[in-house]
């Protein structure tokens, strides 16, 4: 990798999803040039070979640009779906009654196949069932061995559409057989981050972390009521979280989603876990060359909350203007971070300082030193990902230059707010802060913080260097 590093000039990062419209090497490089820091491989779609080609394209772009680029492998999770119908769909009448059957398919005109008997057994009278991402609503009128539902309005239910019970924890594991195969593939390919869908408990997180065995950080996607009920414990257990607003909007009334987003962001930031906000951020740009004003405000709101990253999904996976969407998202981030009230807004989501650890005090002291000495940046040396996230947690005024020869560490660090990972062959020499400063293309003074402790003793060296 080239030693040249081109700083983005912003703190929040951009995740771009790769798909049929964007996985070509030239397009991936254009996305990186436009501002993408992390590339998402959505294992809900595409083959393992598709994802291998996508990852190789990211590595090619990384080499061409001389800047670390991360790959996030997003596992599908237990997306519960209906089976198949004769003719591919079933017409639902208003107030019509239908029987749910634990089968893969049916040709009966009043049956809905749901190949998950454990879910049908958990249904209770009055439960609200949502299909096709909430576009179809059914109400359970009879529980038991042959549950029945009534359609709340006329609709057409097609093969393999999603099926969920609103506000209810479902008795399914967060890791399916497909997910295990996909996880093995992602780790073999060298994915830098792993995302787990439909997390409901700490046990879900710990199960997958055991399989990963330290080879990549785990991002818990928060999209089920059970996860929100166990929020603090799940955030503690995971290496980061994603506000997956698509399925949150199915599980909760739409007006509750912004409130839940604020709660997740505040909890993650207080605990020093990176947080991504995802879904429909610039949705209209799937077709249009410019976002709506509401979408622009949505991205800005997330940045005002101090999230580590904002994500593009279909906008870059299948959209007509993928690089433009990334560039516009970057412009929104730049403008928001330059706003007069930006730093005041960040403080609202900081969390309770009475719970601070020693490293929190060190991180704030290092930023204060950089400010007092009019430094251009804060250089950081530590081999611990968790210590790096704690420095990012405080959302300091000075960008953090993180140097390492370990490319896996640098790529994973791309997720962190305000952290600019830089590849350096040797970080152990005395002039390492100046090396990072110059490699970043900066001049002036540089503050630095270097870990000097061990497992039993916390010790840091803070100082200022001038070229």
Image (cartoon, rainbow, N blue to C red):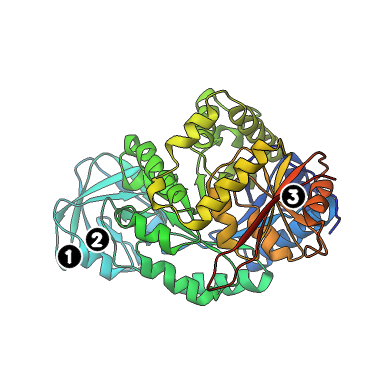
Q: Which residue is mark 1?
A: 146
How crowded is the residue under tag 3: few (<14 C-alpha within 10 Å), some, or many (20+)?
many
Residue 359 in the image: state x and y as whole percent. Answer: 53, 56
* Quarter of the image with the C terminus in it: top right
Between marks 3 and 2 in the image, the one whose residue lies nearer the viewer: 3
Q: Earlier in the sequence, mark 2 or mark 1?
A: 2
Q: Residues within 10 Å of mark 1 (few under 14, many from 20)?
A: few
Q: Nearer the viewer, mark 1 or mark 3?
A: 3
| Quadrant in which residue 443 is drawn | top right
Depth check: give the residue in front, 119 or 374.
374
Question: Which sits earlier in the primary sequence, circle 3 or circle 2?
Answer: 3
| Mark linked to residue 160 | none
Residue 418, horizontal then vertical, whole percent: 63, 44
- Could you tell me how far apart the alpha carbons at marks 1 and 3 are, in whole angstroms? 50 Å
Horizontal relation, residue 155 to residue 70: left or right: left
Q: Is residue 39 visible?
A: yes
- The dot on residue 100 is 2
Task: Examine the rendered structure and indicate whether residue 461 appears above or below residue 309.
Answer: below
Q: Left or right: 302 with respect to 369?
A: left
Residue with the mark numbered 3? 28
Whichever of callouts 1 and 3 sits on the residue coming sooner in the sequence is 3
What residue sits 35% from the left and 64% below the top?
Answer: 201
* Apparent side of residue 48 relative to residue 304 in the rendered image (left or right): right
Horizontal placement of 38 versus 230: left or right?
right
Is the residue under label 2 in contact with that under label 3 (CB below 8 Å)?
no
Q: Residues within 10 Å of mark 2 (few under 14, many from 20)?
A: many
- Give residue 95's quadrant in the image: top left
**Real-space Cα separation, disc 3 to disc 2, in angstroms:** 44 Å
Mark 2–mark 1 CB contact (< 8 Å) = yes
Name the residue rendered at 33%, 52% in the picture: 228
Could you say which is closer to the camera, residue 449 or residue 189? 449
Position in image of residue 261 (x %, y %)? 40, 42
């Amino acid at each position: 990798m080239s030693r040249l590093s081109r700083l983005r000039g912003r703190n929040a990062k951009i995740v771009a999803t790769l798909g049929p419209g964007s996985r070509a090497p030239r397009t991936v490089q254009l996305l990186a040039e436009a501002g993408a820091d992390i590339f998402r491989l959505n294992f809900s779609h595409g083959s393992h070979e598709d994802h291998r080609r996508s990852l190789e394209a990211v590595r090619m772009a990384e080499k061409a640009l001389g800047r670390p680029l991360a790959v996030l492998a997003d596992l599908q999770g237990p997306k519960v779906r209906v089976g198949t119908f004769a003719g591919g769909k079933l017409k639902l009448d208003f107030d019509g009654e239908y029987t749910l059957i634990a089968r893969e398919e049916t040709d009966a005109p009043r049956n809905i196949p749901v190949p998950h008997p454990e879910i049908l057994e958990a249904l209770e009278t009055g439960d609200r069932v949502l299909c096709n991402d909430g576009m179809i609503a059914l109400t359970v009128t009879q529980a038991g061995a042959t549950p029945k539902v009534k359609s709340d309005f006329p609709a057409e239910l097609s093969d393999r559409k999603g099926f969920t019970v609103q506000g209810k924890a479902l008795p399914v594991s967060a890791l399916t057989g497909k997910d295990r195969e996909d996880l093995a593939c992602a780790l073999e390919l060298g994915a830098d981050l792993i995302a787990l869908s439909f997390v409901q408990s700490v046990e879900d997180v710990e199960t997958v972390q055991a399989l990963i065995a330290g080879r990549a950080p785990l991002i818990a996607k928060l999209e089920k009521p059970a996860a929100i009920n166990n929020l603090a414990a799940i955030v503690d257990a995971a290496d980061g979280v994603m506000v997956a607003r698509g399925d949150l909007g199915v599980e909760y009334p739409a007006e509750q989603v912004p409130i839940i987003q604020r709660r997740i962001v505040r909890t993650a930031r207080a605990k020093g876990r990176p947080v991504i906000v995802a879904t429909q951020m610039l949705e209209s740009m799937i077709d249009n060359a410019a976002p709506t004003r509401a979408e622009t405000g949505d991205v800005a709101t997330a940045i005002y909350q101090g999230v580590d990253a904002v994500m593009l999904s279909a906008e870059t996976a299948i959209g007509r203007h993928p690089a433009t969407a990334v560039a516009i998202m970057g412009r929104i981030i730049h403008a928001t971070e330059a706003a007069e009230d930006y730093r005041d807004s960040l403080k609202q989501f900081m969390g309770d300082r009475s719970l601070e650890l020693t490293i929190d005090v060190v991180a704030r002291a290092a930023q204060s030193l950089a400010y007092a000495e009019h430094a251009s940046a804060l250089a950081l040396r530590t081999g611990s990902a968790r210590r790096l996230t704690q420095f990012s947690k405080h959302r300091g005024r000075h960008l953090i230059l993180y140097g390492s020869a370990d490319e896996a560490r640098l790529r994973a660090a791309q997720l962190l707010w305000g952290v600019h990972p830089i590849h350096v062959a040797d970080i152990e020499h005395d002039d390492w802060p100046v090396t990072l400063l110059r490699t970043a293309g900066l001049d002036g003074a540089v503050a630095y913080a270097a870990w000097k402790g061990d497992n039993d003793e916390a010790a840091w060296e803070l100082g200022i260097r001038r070229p």
